[in-house]
Amino acid sequence: MRCVTLAMACLLTLGASLPREARGQDSGRIQLDTFSLANGLEVILAPDHSTQVVAVNVWYNVGSRNEQPGRTGFAHLFEHMMFQGSANVPKGGHMSMVEQAGGRMNGSTQDDRTNYWEVLPSNRYNMGLWLEADRMRSLAITQANFENQRETVKEERRLRIDNQPYTGAFLKGVTAPFDAKSCFAYGHELIGSMTDLNAAKTEDVKAFFDLYYTPNNATLTVVGDFDPAEARRLIEQYFSVIPRGKDAPAVACDARFNAGEQRETVTDDKATLPALLRIFLVPEYRNKDHAALELLATILGGGESSRMNRAIAREAKAALATQVGLDVTGPHRGPSTFAALAVANQGVSTDSLDGLISKEIAKVVADGVTDAELTKAKNQRRSSAIFGRQQALNTAESIQSANMFLGSANAVNTDIERYMKVTKEDIKRVAQQYLRRDNSVVILIKPREGPRP
Amino acid sequence: MNRTSSISRIICASASLVACAVAGAQVPTKAPAPGPVKPAAIPPFQEATLPNGLRMLLVESKRQPVLTLAVVVPAGDAFDPAGKEGLATMLADVLTKGAGKRSADQVSSDIEGVGGSIFAGAGVDFLSLRASVLAENAPLAFELMADAVARPTFAAKEVELSRTQALSGLQLEESQPSALASRFFAAQLFGAHPYGKRPTPSTVRSLTVDDLKAFQKERLVPHGALLVVAGDIPFGRARTLAQRYFGSWKGAAPANVTRAQPPVRTKTDILLVHRPGSVQSNITVGNLTYAPDSPSYYALTVADRVLGGGSDGRLFKTLREQKSWTYGAYSSAGRNHDIGTFEATAEVRNAVTDSALTELLRLERSMGVTAVGSEELDAAKGGLVGRLPLQLETAQGVAEQVARYTMLGLPKDFIRTLRPRLAAISAEQVQQAAKAYMRADQSLVVVVGDGAQIYEKLAKIAPTRIVNAQGDAMSPSDLTPKVTTLPVDLTKLAERADSFAVLVQGNPMGFQTTSLKKTAAGYSYRNAMVIGPIMQQTVETTFGNDLAPQATKADGKMQGQNVAVDVTYANGRAKGTGVSPSATGMKTVTIDTTVAPGVLDDNMVSALVPGLRWAPNARFSVNAFDASEGTMKQLTMSVSGTESVTVPAGTFPVYRVDLAGQAQPMTFFVTTAAPYRIVKMLMVGTPVEFVLVK
């Protein structure tokens, strides 16, 4: 939205396009100061002196989508490696330094990006910058650290995925609409293969770091109570010495919409009840249809009062639980997935579960959604965006997300409009266009029968 | 590196001198020093008192168009009338479950429909409510909050739901050592002062809608209550909305209550809460401190952080990292309206209970003897000074902090000056505060654990009294387990097969079948169960006509993990293996242990139910061996009521029986007439129930 020169006209059109219930103040414009260092590090500063908190937030433009066949699992492994110490920070030092400053910190991996952050009282944000620079410049990639973290990752996989019913099938399921040949990026699992990790050598890990953990492949966002001139000076001092790296290779993903329904049956050792997962192929995050798809996912499967939970779990008593989600392993710059999961109740077949899910989808395709449902979904989207803006970390994440997925950090100020403009017709249209049988993969998850191996 | 310096030279050539000097500077090898600590950035409060006496504080902030309302009333648990303990908590629970013109469902759908949230709860001193909304929905938030506090409807259904949850909570507490410890610690520390009172199943059962109404009328009054509004709303509008919705809230100021003084301790003494079969001991050490406005607050807060404030604390570093006696050891200094407490806790293995207690007391004592070093002091103060801004980041955080400190009677600038005051604390002040308020030699010690294993060692540390989980005094000789023989009438133990449906929140989610068969050498009891994706298990236990267990075999999956038991009983011993889930993953135990005559296998207990003589107030105790863990347990079945239940198999007059002594407490319902048949079972504190189908 460019509302500078024609402010009045803009406001009028914007006002007219908003539903009455959702009209109100917005979250306020975030003033962004964006620049790049000579080594390519992109920096976005968003000062806000209304609190005494600063979020230091680094996004590396690397996720599982960048992994190559035979070399999967590295993106997630790095999330662990980054806390193993660097030239001036001992192992475990990162966490205790932040704790002793009264702050919080963490990191996470998605398909398209890996993030690292610290939330600190404003008189200590300089330490956050220094900690991030130290590991970007001099991460301790030693044989011992690597082997140790490889074991930790395996243990994490064992506890959080292999030992949990449905999780493994679900994570594998969202890769099913992609052909690993034409789209390896999204056609393999976020967590990666243990065989690949086992075969990896320290040199491979070092090479991955050198290629992706470079200043020219990262965006540093600082939000909160700091002086931008001082921040810039510190950033230049800490980060400028880090050499620019090679450009990371581009990622290609070619996926075919409406390629015909695929069916797969997966045996889940850990499951005791069958489940059904139906996954539709949908377009990238910045696509015009994304907002409508997201509101549709909320209406169909977001919470207790959602359509699927009411119809399939509460009324038909056919499912123990239902869930609908868009971009479940993070937003994509390429094609993505819209997933519906239902775990069957005792004695309910996956076929009848599939029938019930299809019936709910068919209802939206034929009749759309109600005004009340759409208003509630929009209200929830809007209020969560505004409540989120109270916290520096959330704001930093939104800025990074706009920058990566909408192509401009400033889009953080206008993204909510996409959701507020969605009409009932849009919802019906995207349901018709994407939630088609021939545009989906259905995965029947069966518990293992008979004696265990 | 060459390439980088040449690039920075090019930039330098075209940029200002200042930037050049910086780009050429060395990267420091140490983290930069902290900037100065500023007072909290919290705007001055705007204040009004409504004609009905309600005090309103506004902390206005235009940062984001959001708003949090908090209503705090001096009507916490400490105001529960004698014999009605649990009343304030139940009142808080039902206030938002129907008020004014809305039912419970309407309250939740109205607030969720605008993307907001509402909450109510009772603490020891105060009953609090909170709602967060976008600023444009301010009228809804004022209306919901005012209705909840002034016009609750007390729908019978919601009151009963709250009672059921409270009772399960209490029953669950009995199986949790930390909850037991907290209950006994409060009772001993505060004596007759109301902070020592806790609800019991009988007080919770006695609560009526009339009690709730009377308490609400007497205690939930605008005089003495506080409304905090934090966020984006001008003062005039906040006052108008407050008057519009809270204006008709009326009630006379309640009479002042005089409270008994808590006892004074002159030496350290131990209360051992005997929990047979416990493999760990839960240690709590502590003493009373000061009124909330004490100037010692700042120094003791720092001392507490040094001693037990987290993974950097001395307790954690010593008891966990150095000695490996525990997963965690912490301390806390809490403030209350009347008087605060200092407490240190650790959960340790039986064998090291005395060493851990001695070490904990030594570490506590040393805080008052030796001054802390500057590095440790700075780290502790840094964490405390630093976390406050994070707590005040949202309107909700501001409202909560302002409400709490104001109700504790602290000065208006308390939050603003907290950071500099903490930052100014010296090592000497820490030592003085620790000497005064970390009283290792005038402490109350509560240990929850297996007295048979730990009593004698504890008694060497300080005078030790023993009670059971119900609080009845015990003598050391009572600790040696006496095997009680379950009075089973074998003629009533006929072959049988029962099928149950497993319901989760009322939805069918699995089944259980149980069958008892005669064998050549006694009986075989088989129990097969599937609960959704949570568990699937078959257990078969054989036992003789003399009720001596012969073998237990189990096979199944729990939360996706394989569980198995294979134990044989012979010649006074149990031998075999058990694989079961634990907090840290699957645990395999090799079992080879003595089992005294008269001890049952714990799977036998439900098999024997028809052979017992059930009656109102019947109570059976039995020593049972848990073959999956290899531990001995004392199980108690006590009839706690007579009622009628309807299950798919029919409607039956039943005794309600509480089964205590195992990790997951249960309640089951057995028919009042022979053959005593179990028709329903509840897993306490979970939404899972078993109902007899046929």
Image (spheres, grey):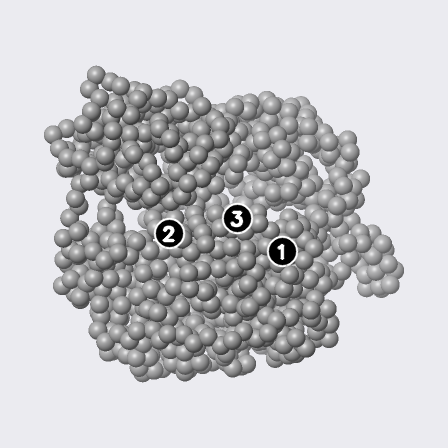
* Disc marking residue B173: 2
Mark 1 neighbour density, 10 Å: few (under 14) some (14–19) many (20 or more): many
On the image, the x and y values in percent for residue A426 come to 78, 40
Give me the residue at 55% from left, 71% from top. B403
Q: Amino acid at mark 1?
A: Thr
Amino acid beneath label 3: Glu
The first of marks 3 and 1 along the sequence is: 1
Image quadrant in which the C terminus of chain A is located? top left
| Residue annotated with mark 1 | B153
The residues tagged by marks 3 and 2 sit, at their Cα atoms, a distance apart of 20 Å
* Closer to viewer: mark 2 or mark 1: 1
Q: Is tag 2's residue or tag 1's residue first in the polypeptide sequence?
A: 1
- In the image, B12: left or right of B447? right
The location of residue A152, given as percent across then percent down, is 37, 45
Q: Chain of mark 1?
A: B
Type of amino acid under label 2: Glu
